Image: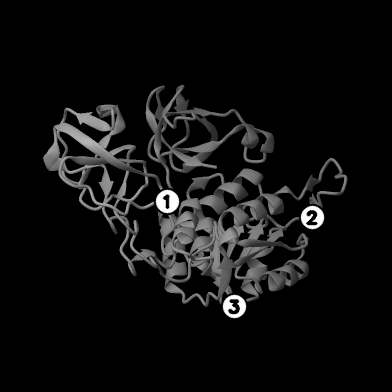
Amino acid sequence: MLTFLEARATVLAKVRAMPVATSTEGVRIEEACGRVLAEDVAADRDSPAVARSVRDGYAVRSSDLPGSLEVVGEIRAGQSFRGEVGPGQAVEIMTGAPIPAGADAVVMLEHTARKDGRVRIDGSAEPLQFINPRGCEAAAREVVLRTGARLDYSHVALLAAFGRAQVRAYARPVAAIIATGDEIVEIGETPEAWQVRNSNAYSLAAQVTRAGGVPRVLPIARDTLDHTREMIGQGLAADLLLLSGGVSAGKYDVVEPALASFGAELYFDRVAIQPGQPAVFGRARGKFFFGLPGNPSSTMVTFEIFARAALELLAGRKETALPMPLARLTRDFHHRPGLTRFLPARWSEDGSEVTPVGWHGSGDIPALTRANAYLVADPERAEYARGDLIRVLMK
């Protein structure tokens, strides 16, 4: 049985080692956020294109200060100044406006006193004070975004600033999702007391979308080898296959035998974690698959710590991370050592504290909705006191 870190490393190594035939497509800037860039993007001009002021104040010659200067003009953002700042002169300037010829510094408005067409500045100024020189942010033809970046709103702003109304992005990988089990009914049905609605398929679909993939929910696979094999065959047409349930060692857990009929290679089928210990990862017919345990929390956690990384790499990402910052416990906490445990918790808004959320096991969906994170209990440590640091995984 692999440890959590060994299992995650296995996922990363196997997916990175496999050539991924990822197609690309043109994406309009309005739809680019969240997409993975498939080309380098270069600046089409210097940024800024001219030296500009970063404060409201006066553009001056630093050698004239301190002193009283003649105000010979005003420049707003979007305007230029045709003259030149000569000895003993100043130009009133607004934030973002171009620096006039002759000036080499800007003095903030708060440090000046203006009267009768002159401005009094009692302090000195350093050359380039409050000036962004031409090209200090990016030079023309400099690569400002690299292939493999997942675009966020700041990247979108950069694309717009350099005139890119469209970019090449990797096509989003399709993840087929199959819930398994005779006890599962569709969400529009009224379940009997011994049945449950198909919540896992839709929570997985939401997680796939958030990770940059396209979810494809397939019909529920019933607990027979033939039907499960039929559904898996359909699922292997996608870029990634996610199965929920049927991966334990029960009499009617038929997922692994069904996968074996497709010549599946298993990289692991058990991990020292809770929830999610019987997690499965492998490859069949050239496609990676995950068999995720069927309890809702197990499905959610194992997707986040294992399958999400695979999906991001298949989407064209060069790197994938799993941030688990430290926070201080608000109360004592203990667990049985031996497994890395991911337990529902409330993480404070400032990220400094975390509080375990009471729950009734990995099928307790209402408890999961009261949590905004999971605390991550170390497999080698049983006891934590209030105020101790513990790792936290965001939901």
Q: Vertically, is 349 above or below 78?
A: above
Q: Callout 2, which amino acid?
A: Asp
Q: CA distance from mark 1 to mark 3?
A: 59 Å
The first of marks 1 and 3 along the sequence is 1
- The answer to which of 33 and 220 lies nearer the viewer is 33
- Secondary structure under tag 2 reads loop
Nearer the camera: disc 1 or disc 2: 1
Q: Callout 1, which amino acid?
A: Gly
Question: For this view, does 131 lie left or right of residue 257?
Answer: left
Q: Quadrant of residue 174?
A: bottom right
**Residue under label 1:** 78
Q: Vertically, is 42 above or below 296?
A: below
Residue 347 position, x and y percent, is 50, 31
Q: Residue at x 14, y 35 (%)?
A: 65
The first of marks 1 and 2 along the sequence is 1
Q: Quadrant of residue 178?
A: bottom right
Residue 83 position, x and y percent, is 28, 52
Label 3 packing within 10 angstroms: few (<14), some (14-19), many (20+): few
Residue 264 position, x and y percent, is 58, 73
- The answer to which of 253 and 4 lies nearer the viewer is 4
Label 2 packing within 10 angstroms: few (<14), some (14-19), many (20+): some
The first of marks 3 and 2 along the sequence is 2
Question: For this view, does 312 lie left or right of residue 296?
Answer: left
Question: For this view, does 251 lie left or right of residue 391?
Answer: right
Q: Quadrant of residue 382?
A: top left
**Residue under label 2:** 182
